[in-house]
Amino acid sequence: MKVRLLILVFFSLLGWSLYLPGQNSRDATPFSSSASSAYIRQSDGAYVTDNRSFEFANVLHDDGSGYIRLLLLKNVHNEHIGGREETTGQMAVQAWTLEKDGTRNERWSFKAEGNDGYALNDVRFFRLTEWGCCDWPNVYSFFSLLSGKKLYVSNSDLTEVVVLNSGPQAARYVAVGCYKHGIPPMLQYGTDTEVKQRFSLLSSRHCDDRPEIFVTVGSKHEKSLSLASNEPLNFTILLTYADGTELRIPVRSDAIRHEEAKLPRGYTLSSEAVGNW
């Protein structure tokens, strides 16, 4: 296939030598990055970018006492065809655990649709962004930095509930999002290693009309909560729409009690199986 080259940039990280596929996972030989490029594909006029980059991530141990150091290699491929509004993309990420003696162990990898992504070290997630288009919002996918498993999808940042002095394993997360055309938005609840519950949020609203997410233990709406370690995990999830419509969904003893939710007429929460996306 003939391609007209606009930009072709080859770069290497100073002092890093070539890494070959199949290299021993405990090898301490330095890595290198390969070429990045941008070009127009003549077969369909697509504007294409391919970018490879390295990133370090510091991931807290479960008890919060120290860090796991990860090296991430990100490969991002984006395409935009003239005359169309959307930009399609795919990202592949590989992760290695870095030891103090300089060796590394391959930990996980994934490939997924998306246009950009980076590690959120403070909450032990990798966030992958699939750009929105027209009346379709951005879709954020949150992968565990510990395992590479896809856990949550949302159209906004995760809402966090922290238990004080308990380490990251005690934190809980709430997400609401549309992720596929024809599928209703999904309410999700769990930790940074597993999703405990999922519910389809059924109503006549479209995905471009999405709620803000709050949590509360009283009357004040919060974007995050901090609870004492000697208290049960009891709070309320609030979904608030721009027109003032509000859904109140209780969490009692670390579980969403959808049967006790206060929902306006025309809204339903339908329990879904928790599995892979």
Image (cartoon, rainbow, N blue to C red):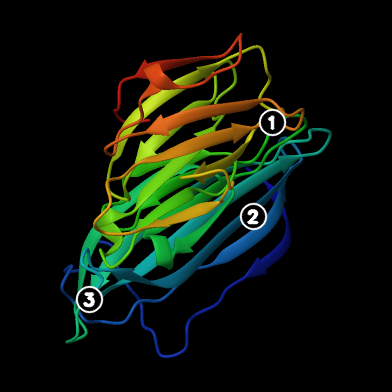
Q: Secondary structure at mark 1?
A: loop
Residue at screen point 36% across, 60% down: 124
Residue type at mark 1: give it. Answer: Tyr
Residue type at mark 2: give it. Answer: Thr
Q: Secondary structure at mark 2?
A: strand
Going from N to C along the chain, the mark reached first, 3 or 2, is: 2
Report whether residue 92 is seen.
no
Q: Is residue 243 left or right of residue 141?
A: right
In this rendering, is residue 47 above or below 53? above
Could you tell me residue 64's position as x and y percent? 26, 70
Which label lies toward us, 2 or 1?
1
- C-alpha gap between disc 1 and disc 3: 40 Å
Along the viewing direction, whichever of 230 and 141 lies nearer the viewer: 230
Along the viewing direction, whichever of 127 and 13 lies nearer the viewer: 127
Could you tell me residue 181's position as x and y percent? 60, 20
* Residue that badge 3 annotates: 65
* Residue that badge 2 annotates: 49
* Residue that badge 1 annotates: 241
